[in-house]
Image (cartoon, helix red, strand yellow):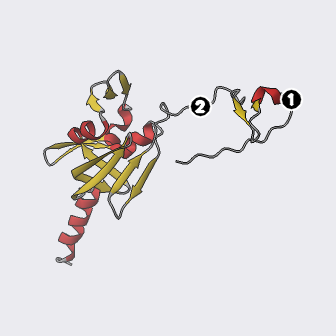
Amino acid sequence: METRFPALFLLLIMAAFPAIAKETRATIVYDDVATELSGANEEASQLWITTADLTRATHFELKPQGVCQEKLCFPIPKARKQEFLRNNAGKSWFNLTAFAQLVRQPVAHDAGLSTWYFGLRADQRQTLSSLQAPDFTLPDINGKTHSLSDFRGKKVFLVTWASW
């Protein structure tokens, strides 16, 4: 019984403190720019990076009013501060995946390559102001021009194609 107590005690202590992930290399793709990080923490599908790397990879910086980029600023909810920030091993760490959830930003992660892709935030996405297609004019195969507005009130089937 004496030999089990220290091991059980150690397990209880470890469970009481958040896991300290091993620093690893990671690639972050943010605003379509890839940034290599030499020290990132990946734990439980969360990406923790230093606040210096936050600025380097995303151009956001941590300020008293929140996570800011020029005049754009996203406040961190005070009740959830521990989800976003922590100090560990003399460094300030920021949970970039928690921030992505806060700003409704899609995230794709390739664990094998340790690569994280961050899509457009909700404030960056364009939305249709109406369900009406804009008017345009194009030639048919015989060279006669037609405008979409010429078919107003009729059903139109549009086929589009792009080379990219």
* Residue occupying the point 29% across, 48% down: 48
* Residue occupying the point 31% across, 38% down: 58
Query: Which residue, given by chain and number where applicable, does mark 1 sit on?
Result: 153
First of labels 1, 2 by sequence position:
2
Q: Is residue 50 shown left or right of residue 97?
A: left
Tell which of 1 and 35 is nearer to you. Answer: 35
Type of residue at label 2?
Answer: Thr
Query: Which residue, given by chain and number where applicable, does mark 2 sit on?
Result: 127
Give residue 46's mark: none
Q: Is residue 73 shown left or right of residue 25?
A: right
Compared with 39, 7 (above or below) is below
Given this view, does label 1 or label 2 mark the residue nearer the observer? Answer: 1
> In the picture, residue 24 is in which quadrant?
bottom left
> In the picture, residue 63 is in which quadrant?
top left
Q: Is residue 133 shown left or right of residue 125?
A: right
* Residue furthest left in the image: 90
Task: Please provide percent x and percent y for residue 54.
Answer: 27, 39
Q: CA distance from mark 1 to mark 2?
A: 25 Å
* Residue furthest front in the image: 142
Tell which of 95 and 109 is nearer to you. Answer: 109
Task: Please provide percent x and percent y for residue 163.
Answer: 55, 48
Task: Please provide percent x and percent y for residue 141.
Answer: 74, 42
* Residue furthest top in the image: 71
Q: Is residue 31 shown left or right of residue 52?
A: right
Secondary element under disc 1, as helix, strand or loop, is loop
Residue 19 in view (yes/no): yes
Type of residue at label 1?
Answer: Gly
* Residue occupying the point 80% across, 38% down: 156
Compared with 10, 121 (above or below) is above
How crowded pointer 2 is (Cα within 10 Å; few <14, some 14-19, many 20+) is rated as few
Task: Please provide percent x and percent y for residue 95.
Answer: 32, 44
